Image (cartoon, grey):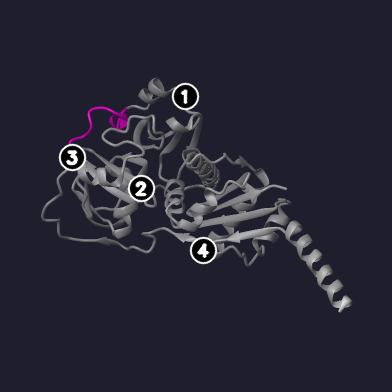
Amino acid sequence: MKTLFRILIVLSIIAIIYNFTNNSSNELEPLKGPNSTAPIIPKTDYPEGFEDALPRPESGISTLIDQDSKIVKEKFGEPHRIDQTNFGYEWWVYNEEFDSFVMFGIEEGLVTQVYIAGEKLDAEPYKIGQSLDEIYRMTIVDTEVTAQIDDNIYTFSLNEEDMRTRILTKFDGVFAQLYVDQMKEKLTGIRFLNSETLVKHRPYEMTFVGELIRAPSLNSHNLMKRNEASGKQLFDLINLYRFNHHVSLLEWDDAASNAAMEHSEDMYTEKYLSHDSPNNGSLKQRLDHHQVSFKEVAENLAADYFDAIEASHGWFNSEDHREVILNNKFTHVGSGAFLNYYTQLFINKP
């Protein structure tokens, strides 16, 4: 009896030591873009009628769409960072203060879009933090929205999830994508953009009559710059989300970001979406290879979102991924993207 008791004591001590020293990981189901498999359908018949458009706002940041980029510098100063994209425009990022966070899409000296996430900014007629009920009361919300460019007609169809989390509204000469936190039913981000940029993005199921506008091809140098930029945007947006939920901010980790970038590229190249790589092994093996030490780690994965903004909002609206993003025990983050594959590592450092 004494021998059995001693064995139980030893086993208990071993279990306690294991719990304190073992590195744990949290691997969630990867996300795929909501319209990743939607076909782009050419048609020969023009739509019978177009939906009504709201009057274009006379004030606020949306008035800068299609204006000279010099106006942006006059109002906001020099951008804190300039990011490359694979759509022909570059992002001017103003991320110094989270409550005035904004990004301007600039193409050939003109503002083609703006993404607003800072609650201090004038996003007329909307406001960050606005309720979903109020948005539905004040705006025209349709499941089909058309855009016309010359003689070409593009029709976007919104599904049920889009109507809850990514509403598309039409004004005279400009569109607005409204990113909604479906857990709180609050507006967390707004993207104002012109017709050409909306068609390039193809964020919803789309049919068209006429010619299809395509994004330009990327060379290897621009592709590398674009991927680096997407990783930085993931970092900005995740910390912005934590800031708005009063959670401590995460520090950028170079080694973890390299591991995240490598995994995104591997998933794209090998055509899979998983935490386990056929080339580099499990999450723990990948982090060991990059000499990333951790007490605990979680990994968020996404694919088929056309940019970092869309991928981030996808994670925000997934209960499990959101829980990781807002977990206060994590101290560092590694972010990496390769085209439309996204990896983000949340790390509790020893």
Q: Going 36% across and 39% down the picture, which residue do you hit?
A: 129
* Secondary structure type for disc 4: loop
Tell which tag, 2 or 1, sits nearer the viewer. 2
Q: Could you tell me the amino acid type at mark 1?
A: Glu
Mark 2 and mark 1 lie on one chain; the one further toward the N terminus is 1
What separation in Å lies between label 2 and label 1 (alpha carbons)?
Answer: 29 Å
What separation in Å lies between label 3 and label 4 (alpha carbons)?
Answer: 39 Å
What separation in Å lies between label 2 and label 3 (alpha carbons)?
Answer: 20 Å
Mark 1 and mark 3 lie on one chain; the one further toward the N terminus is 3
What separation in Å lies between label 4 and label 1 (alpha carbons)?
Answer: 40 Å
Q: Could you tell me the amino acid type at mark 4?
A: Glu
Marks 2 and 4 in Cβ contact (< 8 Å): no
Which disc number belongs to residue 329? none
Tell which tag, 4 or 1, sits nearer the viewer. 4
Which disc number belongs to residue 54? 3
Q: Assess disc 3: are there few (<14), some (14-19) or many (≥20) residues with their C-alpha within 10 Å of its C-alpha.
A: some
Asked whether residue 81 is in view, the answer is yes
* Label 2 sits on residue: 180
Mark 4 and mark 1 lie on one chain; the one further toward the N terminus is 4
On screen, residue 106 above or below 39: above
Which disc number belongs to residue 78? 1
